[in-house]
Amino acid sequence: MSRQPLGTALVTGASTGLGSVYGDRLAHRGHDLILVARDAGRMEALATQLRAGTGRAVEVLPADLTDPAALARVADRLATDPVVTLLVNNAGMSMKGGLLDNGPAEVQRLIALNVTAPTLLAGAAAKAFVARRSGTIVNIASVLAVAPEAYDGVYSGSKAFILNLSLSLAGKLREAGVHVQAVLPGATRTEIWERSGTDLNAFPAEKVMEAGDLVDAALLGLDRGETVTIPPLADEAQWTSYNAARLAMGPNLSRRDVASRYRPTT
């Protein structure tokens, strides 16, 4: 009996780090690939290796996702190519230093790559997948989405946006047969640290996960149907309690009357 075709996975930030590992793992699972990143040379090397090792079709689609025209081309591919069944929204960046150390151009570039690009790509994929009543969107966020005090607020805020986007989409698209997963890595050994001027070797060794381990755990979470996957978190009850507390606040967040704790006392 032949296996059900898995279709094509489009992976952003695929030239290195988590994106290249996702490409490797998904090809070995039986997906054809569309690799998206700026570095065409590194993607071609990965594509050659994966074609030889897995027999899958691997297309290289060079694109700088901070460029609106390039982003539109990738979004159009998601919207119009019926063989694409999985989007891995992985491309991202951090800055050297924080908000006080950078100018408008650096901040705008981070927002363009970490917020605007994944939002538009997720939207394009979601519309196409809903029309076919099938498909998967994986958004790479960060544990900093729930720990903003631990790092610069621009980066952690961009990842909180991705978590919020994922939770909202997951609830809205579930009945249409579309699964959305947010993956929240902790410190993971990728080039994003070097690019932001951070020495990852200064971190305690037990705090840094290898990229392959992270992606393998994330894919296991995807197989289990998880909406939020936090590979370094050992106690699942901590996330469950956190999320339950958040949801419990929902009915109380919008009321006609000011809460009694904010009323003047006489």
Image (cartoon, grey):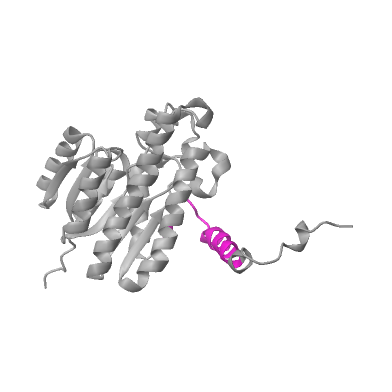
Residue at 33% x, 55% y is: 138
Q: Is residue 213 left or right of residue 243?
A: left
Q: Which residues are magenta?
A: 228-248
Q: Residue furthest right?
A: 266
Residue name at image x 31 percent, y 38 percent = 66
x%, y% of residue 251? 60, 69
Q: Residue furthest front?
A: 256
Q: Quadrant of the N terminus?
A: bottom left
Decide whether the magenta segment is chiefly helix, strand or loop. Answer: helix
Picture quarter containing residue 16? Answer: top left
Residue 125 in sight here: yes
The number of numbered discs placed on residues in the rendered structure image is: 0
233 within the magenta span:
yes
Q: Does residue 123 sit above or below 244 in this rendering?
A: above
Q: In this rendering, is residue 100 above or below 8?
A: above
* 213 horizontally vs 5: left or right: right
Q: Nearer the viewer, residue 174 or 216?
A: 174
Residue 94 versus residue 105: which sits nearer the camera? Answer: 105
Residue 42 lies left or right of residue 116; in this view the side is: left
In the rendered image, residue 242, in percent from the top left (x then y), is placed at 57, 59
Residue 29 visible in the shown view? no
**At 47% across and 36% down in the image, what residue appears?**
205
Judged left or right of residue 134, residue 222 is right
**Residue 224: x and y, percent?**
36, 65
Instruction: Identify whether 231 is placed above or below 253.
Output: above
Question: Which residue corresponds to the image point at 35% horizontal and 37% vertical from the top-left?
Answer: 190
- Quadrant the C terminus occupies: bottom right
Residue 206 falls inside the magenta stretch: no
Q: Residue 241, position in %: x, y?
A: 58, 62
Q: Quadrant of residue 106?
A: top left
